[in-house]
Amino acid sequence: MKIIVILKQVPDSETKIKVKGDGSGIETDGIKYVISPYDEYAVEEALKLKEKAGGDSTVTVVSAGPDRTVESIRTALAMGADAAVHVNDPALEGADSLGVARALAKAIQDNGFDIIFAGKQGIDQDNSQVPSAVAELLDIPQVNIIAKFEITEDKSKATVSRRIEGGEETIETSLPALFGCEKGLNEPRYASLPGIMKAKKKPVKTVDLAGLGLDAGEVGAAGSHVKILKWIPLPERQAGKILQGMETAEASKELVRLLREEAKVI
Amino acid sequence: MPTATEAGLSDTQRQVVELAREFARERIEPFAAEWDRTSHFPRDVIDEMGKLGFFGMTTPEEYDGMGLDTVTYLLALEEVAAADAAIAVSMGIHNAIPTTMLVKHGTTEQRERWLKPMARGELLAGFALSEAEAGSDAASLAAQATKEKQGWVLNGAKAWATNAGTADLMMIMARTDQTGARRGAKGISTFIVPTDSPGYTACKPEDKMGLRASNTAAIELSDCRLPADALLGDGGMGFVYAMEGLDAGRLGIGAQGVGIARRALEHCIRYTAERRQFEKPLHDFQAVQFKLADMATRIEAARALAHRAAVRKDAGENVGMHASMAKLFASETAMWVTTQAIQLFGGYGYMRDFPVEKLFRDAKVTEIYEGTSEIQRLVIARALR
Ligand SMILES: Cc1cc2nc3c(=O)[nH]c(=O)nc-3n(C[C@H](O)[C@H](O)[C@H](O)COP(=O)(O)OP(=O)(O)OC[C@H]3O[C@@H](n4cnc5c(N)ncnc54)[C@H](O)[C@@H]3O)c2cc1C
């Protein structure tokens, strides 16, 4: 089985994000980058499927991003993926979700695929668009936010469940299909030391947009349908107010007034 | 934040250190206070680390190890020690002492049988040199090994052996010379002793000040019968093997001290920014700033000393003196930094609810085991003559 994982590198959730002074983006200095956590579930599910399917099954990681993305790709390889395709093109900097999906879909098509796992969303911009767009471009079904995955013996169908308000929805789909993975689907393994050693020798193919036969003017930033106008930092938290030197009854009254009139929460 | 970093690491080395940091942050640190309180040795976590390769880090690849350099090993050990020094001690002893002994002196069969599963994390190994009457003067040890037709018989008692009751095998130092004809260090040999051997008894675990999650216990050897191939290397060379192992071990204690001290500093940096007195955060007082600056400087120096010795070791130099320097400086740094940390936390620092109190208790033993600070100074002074 040709198992594909779409993977995105994002800033570590513990990194403090600072917006650039001119609002054109975020400060990238000192940011630690990691595999988007939902994509780790995708890697784990792909590895589990490979172990189960056996034979000559392979897991190939496909990721679009700048040079630094290779570190996250290597981590996935150290976890046990077999190979990777790295789409690296400066024109993708500032591309919209559709552009990125076009690049990924083409890379996946060139590689061949039987099933695709992705994270349900990237934890940086939380768009949740790329996996669905990739599925659409490849003309295959997709189920997003899956919390359970099972495949039939003949590998022609998969049964997955999604958590929905007040219950669980079970969906059966034909394969190939794309699945967006949710927390709880599995417990991602650690990349082991032997895995890290072996990952050094695993193939990572780097391609640019021209290599994929795509037009940078259309797929890249130049063809983006979305323009981010400005990045605005979260407002600093205001200092609290302390009511002092009042009787309790008087203070309570004042507190209620402030909550109603200033904070507008009651 | 002053996390452990080293200029010039390869991608692979950096990945190894990051894995150690991630594992320590997720699987060790959140539980360390509880293990400390209940004196629980989490063998499952040790096994998980073993499966990931952390118990064969410097073991050559031909023996199923990772074949990594000593600096990478020390960086990984520092991450584990920063999360819980009680876990770090198992990793440090196993990787340094029994592993070094088998790599250097094991027969092909001994390496197959013991070293390979140790490197794969399937067997946990410890080291028993000290006795109740033979601590700093370890060469005066009295446990006796007697040669029989079938193999060896061990009798005597060992004191304070880490993992005596939790390891799968122990490297035990015993005399092979005749009682009454004591030839000091020259009469000692090293034995590979599975802990399920008849006649091997691990006593009740010691109730310790720190490293409470680590198993420390005496061993009773009463007619403990071992096969002939339990003897490691040449008879009478055990003390030399122990000292070789301790060279590697002391670098590990260096990393352990750095890890403990670093975590204490990290807590202090955060706390002194939050805690306000006299209408200012504590870190606005210069006396506090200077303390933090001294803590950070000593930690950097301690790490540099250990790593420098590690580079020498990997280059094949004799590092006896350098390992002692690294161990001495890092352990005294750990004790000093954690003492300052309690001071900076004030009354809160003295409470079990805050983490610096445990770091302080854990730091103390680094000045004692694998040779006290006084013994390190002796080793250094002798090398200067
Ligand atoms: C938690 C823990 C784990 C341990 N794990 C192990 C283990 O796995 N394996 C093992 O074999 N041992 C282990 N030990 C034992 C440890 O190595 C010894 O405690 C240590 O070597 C000191 O010996 P001692 O306690 O007998 O002290 P002593 O030798 O009695 O020393 C007491 C004091 O006298 C000082 N002193 C002694 N001789 C001199 C001298 N010549 N000049 C100046 N000062 C001197 C010492 O520095 C010390 O301050 C462990 C100990 C602890 C506490």
Image: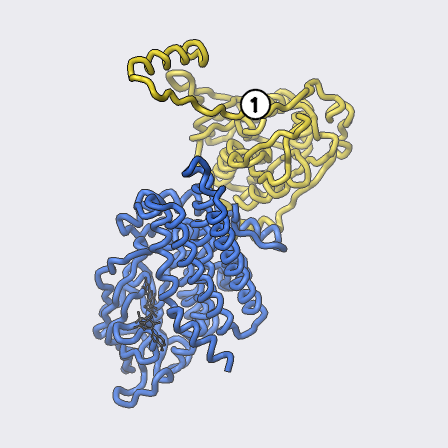
In this view, A104 is above or below B235? above
Q: Nearer the viewer, residue A231 or B293?
A: B293
Q: Residue furthest front?
A: A245
Which chain, by letter, is yellow? Answer: A
Q: Position of residue B331 (x, y in %)?
A: 42, 62
In this view, A29 is above or below A24? below
Q: Position of residue B363 (x, y in %)?
A: 38, 57
* Quadrant housing residue A5: top right
Protein chain holding label 1 = A
Q: Nearer the viewer, residue B291 or B93?
A: B291
> Is the residue marked by circle 1 packed among few (<14), some (14-19), or many (20+) residues within 10 Å?
some
Relative horizontal placement of residue B202, taking residue B370 as reference (left or right) = left
Relative horizontal placement of residue B384, taking residue B175 as reference (left or right) = right
In this view, A117 is above or below B214? above
Which chain, by letter, is blue? Answer: B
In this view, A97 is above or below A250? below
Give the colour scheme shown.
by chain
The residue at the point 37 percent across, 16 percent down is A166
Relative horizontal placement of residue B135, taking residue B269 as reference (left or right) = left
* Quadrant housing residue B169: bottom left
Q: Is residue B51 visible?
A: no
Q: Is residue B233 visible?
A: yes
Q: Position of residue B165 (x, y in %)?
A: 27, 60
Q: Nearer the viewer, residue A126 or B385?
A: B385
Q: Position of residue B4 (x, y in %)?
A: 52, 52
Per the image, label 1 sits on a secondary structure element best described as loop
The residue at the point 22 percent across, 75 percent down is B223
* Quadrant housing residue B148: bottom left
Tell me the kind of residue under disc 1: Ser
The residue at the point 58 percent across, 31 percent down is A114
Residue receiving disc 1: A128
